[in-house]
Amino acid sequence: MDMKEKMPMTPEAPAPEIPAIDLSHQPNLAEGDALIDTSREPKMCADKVGVFYGDKQALKDVSIKIYDDLVTAFIGPSGCGKSTFLRCLNRMNDTIPSARVTGRIDLDGEDITSAAMDVVQLRARVGMVFQKPNPFPKSISENVAYGPRIHGLATSKPDLEQVVEKSLKRAGLWEEVKDRLQESGTALSGGQQQRLCIARAIAVDPEVILMDEPCSALDPIATAKIEELIHELRGRYAIAIVTHNMQQAARVSQRTAFFHLGEMVEYGKTSEIFTNPRQQRTQDYITGRYG
Amino acid sequence: MSAAKRGASRWTDAAMTRRVRRRYLFERIFRGTGLLAISLSVAFLAFLLWNMGSKGISGFSQYEAALPIDFTKSDLFLDPATIKGPDARTTVAGADLSTAIANAAGAAYGPAADQMFSDAAVDRLTDAIVANPSMLTGSTTLWLPVGSKVDVAAKRDGDPAAEKLVGELQQKQALRRTFNTHFLTGADATDPSAVGVWGALKGSFYTILVTILLAFPIGVLASVYLEEFAPRNRWTDMIEVSINNLAAVPSIIFGLLGLAVFLDVMNLPRSAPLVGGLTLALMTFPVIVIAGRNAIKTVPPSIRDAALGVGASKMQVTFHHVLPLALPGILTGTIIGVARALGETAPLLMIGMRAFVAAPPHGIADPATVLPVQIFLWSDEVDRGFIEKTSAAIIVLLLFMLLMNGLAIYLRNRFERRW
């Protein structure tokens, strides 16, 4: 709190020391560079996206590219618009009557903000994991099978069982629940519930997975498991994750975008954002001067 | 901060102790008042049940008297050989059995006793003859239900003549108390010893069936539409206000509406459970809509997000997730609404369900009455025999309600899920 009051920093003040953030989880940077080849087509591309709630502008001119095989982290203080932006990527903002989105968001070159875009299909292609684990109050297998069933991806019982097993295995939950698939999903622990939600999201075989602070309600051990899972999922899906926890962003992501007051301040390789930010505001945030 | 900096503690001084004591005092007073309120309502309930029970329990029993009857002297002109096949009952019923009973009773217990048997005795005698036509050739002794006057005299103080007769019968061991099955299987009658609640019970059942079949689906779908699909504008606001007001309209007004619309305009049959059910459905519908909307509102948004997040359509979110989770709440509202409809009298009086109906209805379009109206009608009768029948009918109504509510609560608990 006191930190906030001291802001803004006077230019004369000595440059704050950047704390040692553990970047050892980052893939070999040379390999990472190859992955972030700028000539590659982005999976999702946001161009000058703005969001209004009624007359109030919550987000302005956000332009960002999200790539396959990479984890993109959105960091920033509370209320900075990072979750709002994430919810634009699969049009979850549609459920808020007063929300209005401007600009353009492409998924594989197709504008998802247009009226012609089928929202149901979009949400199947762009899956979402929420802040609070929210399994359906149904059995574990029912939770995972629900998506494939409504989309007709699997119709017969053996097919559905196969999808359930594959998804739970991929979410690293299979070993823990394989003997009690018929028990309620809400009876699991918080971390298990969140992995169940991830299994539910990947059961419909999405291309992008959005995660809205997936670990904020979890203890450190469950968090570590989810982070490990994100590493494993990275090769298969484009992942965008909102997090409050900068260490987490440094651990799991290859790209980081810093949001502040409804703007995207800086976007770049995670290793660069955390070691050598270009913007003063980013530096202040990651050194603990805000928020 | 150190203790010295805070200053001396004031937790132990007199003013503070007094304040704390006052706070506890208020709590004790509140608890006492609550306990008193609960005890009062329990006492009222106990009094009601005891009162109904003690008065009504005798309504389930019926005195029967032995009647020695010699068919050879009874002028029935019935040939045992013709009493067979499907027309047997009609054949027997065509004979003047009531005169035969009166004559036999007069012969056995003196001229004062010739009207001692109930109207229901004729039916019983008919049954006995149909079952065994050969009895017509000789004489036999039958146990037949006594009329209301004797029945009342046997149960408590009746008029002196009846008391005397009861005394004589008891001396001859010609009087016995039996369970009154006719009360559970018969319909309304002019003689209190011949009345039954089955007709009214069936009428209530058909009426409430029509009510549930109409009000429940329409109410649930209306609340789902208003809560999940309807745009928020002046029209939906107006509809919401109208529905809330409808729930507060006095029930007799719905009766007038039913009379004007269903009977006068649509020409539906008078006194029928169909019209009663339609009228009560109008009354129950707003209760279900209000309860349904509240139940739907309490479904956590995270469940909607979860379903939308895997690509469920609005319709799928509503019917796969929101409605199942809201169902216990909706059912609670339905129970309240239907229980109220089940006990409703006023609107049904308006549409003619207060008619004297001596046969149980066979469908929703037959003339019928319902239990609460039947109770109202009997409570208005002069004959003393109706006092116990009124209370007995109240017991039946309460048990019927208990059964319906139990069923609804069972259903609700089956659907109840936690999240």
Image (spheres, coloured by chain):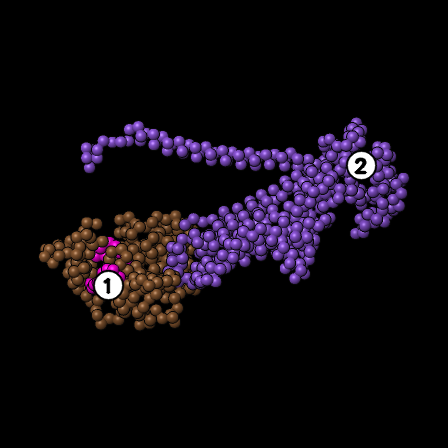
Chain colours: A brown, B purple
User: Disc 2 and disc 1: Cα gap in Å?
Assistant: 100 Å
Q: Residues within 10 Å of mark 2 (few under 14, many from 20)?
A: many
Local SS, label 1: strand
Residue behind mark 2? B116
- The mark found on residue A264 in the picture is 1
Pinpoint residue B307: horizontal percent, then vertical percent.
40, 58
Query: Is residue B271 toward the left or the right of residue A196 in the image?
Result: right
- Residue B280 lies in the magenta-colored region: no
The part of the chain drawn in magenta is: A241-269
Q: Residue at x 78, y 44 (%)?
A: B123
Query: Is residue B196 toward the left or the right of residue B249 in the image?
Result: right
Q: Nearer the viewer, residue B18 or A264?
A: B18
The subunit letter for the residue under badge 1 reads A
- Callout 2, which amino acid? Met
Q: Residues within 10 Å of mark 1 (few under 14, many from 20)?
A: many
Q: Quadrant of the N terminus of chain B?
A: top left
Query: Is residue B221 toward the left or the right of residue A267 in the image?
Result: right
- The mark found on residue B45 in the picture is none
Counting labels gives: 2
Q: Residue at x 72, y 37 (%)?
A: B384
- Residue A247 lies in the magenta-colored region: yes
- Callout 1, which amino acid? Met
Pinpoint residue A2: horizontal percent, then vertical percent.
19, 49
Q: Residue at x 90, y 39 (%)?
A: B73
Local SS, label 2: loop
B58 above or below A152?
above
